[in-house]
Amino acid sequence: MPNQPEQHSIQAWSLINRKYLGKGVRVKRFRKPTRCQIRNRVLLAVLMANDIKLSQLAEDLSISSRSVSAWVYEGRIPGSTNLDKTCQLLGYPRHILFNEEVVRNSPVICQPEPSRFMKRTVTRSPVSNRILTGLCMVHDLSVTDVSHWIGVHPGTFRKWLHQGTLPSAAFQEQAEQFFRIPKTILFADVILKKS
């Protein structure tokens, strides 16, 4: 009678088959960041509103994508050469994109309830206030919800975004308190266009 190979346990078979099946489950290299991990919300808002990926910005600047990620997620300020290149490429001055006070004190905003940004806000009509629109995208906030929380009519808030109208001083203060970013940065698109 021919000898049959001895039976293996399940653990032994898994070790034998590992070389054929791979090394196991692959874990993603980067975890998805939460809102509290974003230090430079203004830079990320401008990138999201312009539909520019971090890797694309890094490629345009001829630097590593980890450096750009550090600017956004760790709040690092780039060197003078890269700072000038970034400001020139995105079309904003340094004190708006890399405002040290905003980066250092980047708090999570207090939204009363869950919300979701609708992409049709950007696709249906052109956006004039890219920073304010980008902040809604960064925090995944519906335009309607933000307008109710600030205390303004949704149509008026959409005018701020799409037509680039500058709100009254009282509404600028309310937007500043909600997003916790100075009004000079929130409405920089309108202010820079006028000057």
Image: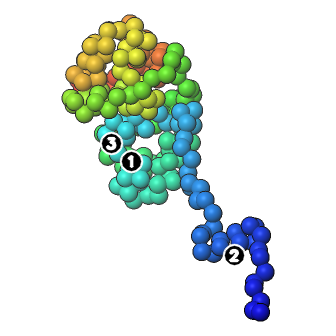
Residue 17, numbered circle:
none
Compared with 79, 11 (above or below) is below
The type of residue carrying mark 2 is: Ile
- Which residue is disc 1 drawn over? 53
The type of residue carrying mark 3 is: Asp
Compared with 66, 110 (above or below) is above
Quarter-wise, where is residue 63 in the image?
Answer: bottom left
The type of residue carrying mark 1 is: Lys
Q: Please tell me how crowded label 3 is: few (under 14), some (14-19), or many (20+) other residues with Cα within 10 Å.
A: few
Residue 16, numbered circle:
2
Q: Position of residue 184 (x, y in %)?
A: 39, 22
Asked whether 4 or 116 is in front, the reply is 4
Q: Are marks 1 and 3 in contact (CB under 8 Å)?
A: no
Q: Please tell me how crowded label 1 is: few (under 14), some (14-19), or many (20+) other residues with Cα within 10 Å.
A: few
Quarter in which the N terminus is drawn? bottom right
Residue 51, numbered circle:
3
Nearer the observer, disc 2 or disc 1?
2
Which residue is rendered at x = 35% and y = 9% of the image? 152
Q: Are marks 2 and 1 in contact (CB under 8 Å)?
A: no
Mark 3 and mark 2 lie on one chain; the one further toward the N terminus is 2
Residue at mark 2 to residue at mark 1: CA–CA distance = 42 Å
